[in-house]
């Protein structure tokens, strides 16, 4: 069984990736549906406000901190970690780093940036809003699954 500082890294990995999975799951299951039900001007304005609020320290500490933790865990696993849980830890780390953090940077953030440049209620924002909701939510489903699977990987490493 994993113990000592390695145990702490794995437990923090479960916690961080699980918390992010929960946030993403909330968006996929009800927040985006609620925003999509609003008139486009209101949905755009609300999402722009959410995107600003998301980059506050509370969420960023968990989101980026989990990425740093997963990268650290992957490096430590390659260098000094005992054979116990090695595959699960590497898989969990990769799922979070690529399927959650990486996907955020290449799929969700560019859409958020494009939306940020639009005025709610403008013809451009009204036309883009349904596409934004559809595409952003699709990629968010994948981020949710990857973050949850990463948490499972860390749990399996502890078993």
Image (cartoon, rainbow, N blue to C red):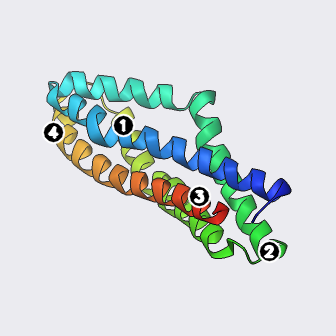
Is residue 107 among the parts visible in the rendering? Answer: yes
Label number found at residue 155: 3
- Estimate how packed mark 4 is, as few (under 14), some (14 to 19) or many (20 or more) residues with alpha carbons within 10 Å: few
Give whichever of 92, 64 is nearer the camera: 92
Relative to 55, say whether 81 is above or below: below
Residue 121 visible within the image: no
Q: Quadrant of the C terminus?
A: bottom right
Query: How far apart, in angstroms, are the residues tagged by discs 4 and 3?
Result: 43 Å
First in sequence: mark 2 vs mark 1: 1
**Dividing the picture into quarters, in which one does residue 47 lie?**
top left
Q: How many marks?
A: 4
Q: What residue is disc 2 on?
A: 82
Is 100 or 89 nearer to us in this picture? 89
> Callout 2: 10 Å neighbours few (<14), some, many (20+)?
few
Q: Residue 128, image x and y in percent? A: 21, 41
**Tag 4's secondary structure?**
helix
> Which is more N-terminal, label 1 or label 3?
1
Residue at 31% over, 43% down: 28
Vertical position of residue 62 compared to residue 152: above or below = above
Name the mark on residue 71: none
Q: List the residue tagged with mark 1.
A: 26
Q: Sequence-wise, which precedes: disc 4 or disc 3?
A: 4
In the rendered structure, which disc, 2 or 4, sits on the residue that comes first in sequence?
A: 2
Q: Which residue is mark 4?
A: 127
Q: Tell whether 22 sits left or right of 66.
A: left
The residue shown at (21%, 38%) is 129
Q: Marks 3 and 1, how far apart in space? A: 22 Å
CA gap, disc 2 and disc 4: 54 Å
Provide the secondary structure element on which disc 2 rests: loop
C-alpha distance separating marks 3 and 2: 16 Å
């Amino acid at each position: 069984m994993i113990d000592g500082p390695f145990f702490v890294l794995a437990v923090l990995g479960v916690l961080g990736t699980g918390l992010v999975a929960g946030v993403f799951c909330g968006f996929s299951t009800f927040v985006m549906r609620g925003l999509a039900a609003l008139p486009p001007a209101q949905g755009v304005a609300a999402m722009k406000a959410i995107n600003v609020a998301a980059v506050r320290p509370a969420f960023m500490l968990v989101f980026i901190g989990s990425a740093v933790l997963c990268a650290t865990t992957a490096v430590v696993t390659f260098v000094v970690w005992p054979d116990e849980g090695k595959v699960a830890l590497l898989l969990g780390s990769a799922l979070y780093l690529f399927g959650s953090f990486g996907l955020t940077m290449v799929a969700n953030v560019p859409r958020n940036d494009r939306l940020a440049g639009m005025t709610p209620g403008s013809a451009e924002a009204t036309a883009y809003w349904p596409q934004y909701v559809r595409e952003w939510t699709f990629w968010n489903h994948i981020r949710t699954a990857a973050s949850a699977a990463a948490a499972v990987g860390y749990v399996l490493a502890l078993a």
